[in-house]
Structure formats: C-alpha cells, structure tokens
Amino acid sequence: MVRTPLSPWERERGERFGALLREARGERSMVEIAAVAGVSAETLRKIETGRAPTPSFFTIAALAFALDLSLDELAAACALPEDAGGEALSA
C-alpha cells in the first residue's frame, strides 16, 4: 500500500497538534504521559515533534484523556483555517 504524500496543510496541522500536546504536558515527562495514554514515549515524541503528523484516532483520544484535553478543543485548534480554502477537505 502506497501512502499519499501529506499536503503542506496536513504537515502544518501535525506540527500544531504536537505543539498543543507539548504545551498541555507542561512539566510532566513524556514517559509519564505516554504510560497513562498506553503509547510508547517514542510515539509521543514523534507526534510532539511533527514527525508523526497523522496519529490514529485512538492514539489522539488516549493522549487527550491522559492530558485532560477535550477532543472538541483539539479538533477546533487543528481545524482548517478559513483562508486555506477547501484543499484539505479531501484528506
């Protein structure tokens, strides 16, 4: 299976999502949050740095739970900007 390359918007969204997680994590360690979420610290590191810009829904939900974040807040913070047009809607 060949994966379609990510658009610039998708990469930017992944970076923004990672930054939100880093901010929410605060002083807590990556290892601590990853353990609560049931993911590896390496997975969390890749997400936070934007190297894994499209984590699965269940990974996102687990991290949101571990960081006491609402999925609605995450979705709104990572939504398509109004001025970006509809190019990302096909993803």
Image (tube, rainbow, N blue to C red):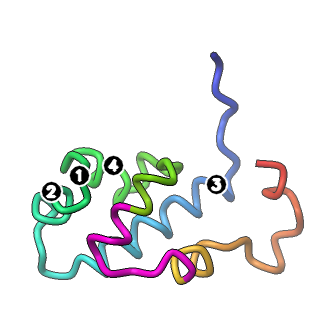
Q: CA distance from mark 4 to mark 1?
A: 15 Å
Nearest the camera: 24 or 51? 24
At label 4, which amino acid type do we have?
Lys
Quarter of the picture containing the N terminus is: top right
Residue 3 occupies which quadrant of the picture?
top right
Q: Secondary structure at mark 4?
A: helix
Q: Residue at x 27, y 70 (%)?
A: 66
37 part of magenta stretch: no
Q: Earlier in the sequence, mark 4 or mark 1?
A: 1
SS at badge 3? helix
Which residue has dot 3 on it?
10
Disc 4 and disc 2: Cα gap in Å? 15 Å
Q: Which residue is mark 1?
A: 38
Q: Earlier in the sequence, mark 4 or mark 2?
A: 2
Q: Residues within 10 Å of mark 1 (few under 14, many from 20)?
A: few
Badge 1 element: loop
**Looking at the picture, how far across and down is residue 37, in whole percent?**
25, 59
Residue matched to label 2: 35
Q: Which residue is mark 4?
A: 46
From mark 1 to mark 3, how far is it between C-alphas? Answer: 25 Å
Question: Circles 4 and 3: CB distance less than 8 Å?
Answer: no
Alpha carbons under labels 2 and 3: distance apart:
27 Å
Q: Is residue 73 left or right of residue 21?
A: right
What residue is at 81 percent from the left and 80 percent from the top? 82
Q: Position of residue 62 (x, y in %)?
A: 35, 61
Give the residue type that dot 2 points to: Ala
Residue sitting farthest toward the right: 86
User: Residue 88: percent from the left, percent from the top?
Assistant: 79, 57
The boundaries of the magenta stretch are 62-72
Mark 4 neighbour class, 10 Å CA radius: few under 14, some 14 to 19, many 20 or more: some
